[in-house]
Amino acid sequence: MKIGMPILYEYNSLIDNVVLAKTLGYDFIELNLNFDYCRGELENDQIINYLKESKLEFTIHFFDEFDAAIYDEVVDAYIEILKKYLELSKDLNIKLLNIHLNEGPIVTISGNKNYLYEKEYDLYIKRLINNLNKIKKITDLYGIKLVLENVKTPKFIQKTYNDLLNQGFMFNYDIGHDYTDNNFLFENLEMFISNIVEFHFHDALDKKCHLALGEGEMKLKYYKSFITNQYVVLEVKSSEELEKSIKKFNEK
C-alpha cells in the first residue's frame, strides 16, 4: 500500500506540494492536469528534476470533464494532450493515470434527468471501450496503469461496470463519491474488488464529500480492510485536512 495526496488549490507550485508530502509522510502525489500550475511546471526542466530528486512516486489525474465516450474528434484531441504530458513526465515515477467515468450529456424533461448514453447504450459502450483501449495502449508504452474512477453511477453506468470488467479494465474506487451516490459500488464491491488498483479515501456526510477523515460517516476501518497493495489517495483539499486525515488513517 502507498498513501498519496492530491495537489492543492491553496498552493501555486508543485514544490510546495512536495514539501508538504514529505513533511507529513505521504508516499506519492496525484498530479492533476486540471491545475494550470501543474501543467505549466511539467514543462519546466528544473521542476521535473526537483520532482525526480524528491524520491516520491506520482500518479496523474486527467481532466475532470474528459468523457471517453464522446465523439472521436474530441477524444482524439484529448489524447494528443495526454501524450504531451506523459512525454513531459516520462522521467518521473508515474504509476497510474486516473480518468473519470462520466455520465455524458443529460436531457432534462419535466425536471427529470435523461441520459443520452442510456438511450444510445450500444453506441456509447462501443465508443467508450474503443477509446479507452486507445488510451491504454499509450499508457502501456510508459509503464503506467489506466484506472477508471466513479463519479456518479446512474443505472446505465452500473451496466457499464459489468462490460468494462469483462474487458479487463482496472478501477479507482472513490469511496466518498459512492457514498453520496447511494453506495451502488459499495453494495457490489466483491464483484470488482480484484480490479481495484487505487482508492480515493475522503469522508462524507449526507451529500457532502471530500471531508477530512473522521468528519463524516465513512466506516474507515471497514474500507481499510479491503486494501492490499493498492494506491490510496487521501483526497481532501487543504494542507490542514491532509495532516488530520493521515493521522486518522494511520490509527490502529
Image (cartoon, grey):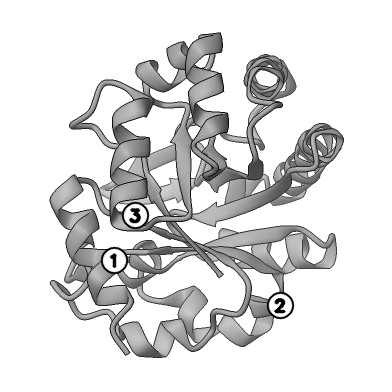
Q: In screen coordinates, is 29 left or right of 92?
A: left
Which of pointers 1 and 3 indicates the residue nearer the eye?
1
Mark 1 Cα within 10 Å, few/some/many (few <14, many 20+)?
A: some
Residue that numbered label 1 is attached to = 246
Q: How far is mark 2 from mark 1, CA to CA?
A: 25 Å
Which numbered mark, 2 or 3, is in the foreground of this view?
A: 3
Circles 2 and 3 in contact, beta carbons < 8 Å: no
Mark pair 2, 3: CA separation: 22 Å
Q: Is residue 212 visible?
A: no
Q: Amino acid at mark 1?
A: Ile
Q: Residue at x 20, y 80 (%)?
A: 217
Which residue bears the numbered disc 3? Answer: 235
Give the quarter of the figure containing the N terminus. bottom right
Residue 122 horizontal/vertical position (percent): 77, 49
Comes first in the chain, label 2 or label 3? 2
Question: What is the secondary structure assignment of the residue under circle 2?
Answer: helix
State how far apart marks 1 and 3 are (Cα): 11 Å
The residue lying at 65 percent from left, 36 percent from top is: 68
Kindly identify the amino acid type of the residue bearing the numbered disc 2. Answer: Ser
Q: Position of residue 208 (x, y in %)?
A: 18, 61
Q: Quadrant of the C terminus?
A: bottom left
Front label number (2 vs 1): 1
Q: Quadrant of residue 76?
A: top right
Question: How far across and how far down the image is residue 29, in percent?
Answer: 45, 44
Closer to the N terminus: mark 1 or mark 3?
A: 3
Residue matched to label 2: 194
- Image point (35%, 47%), residue name: 21
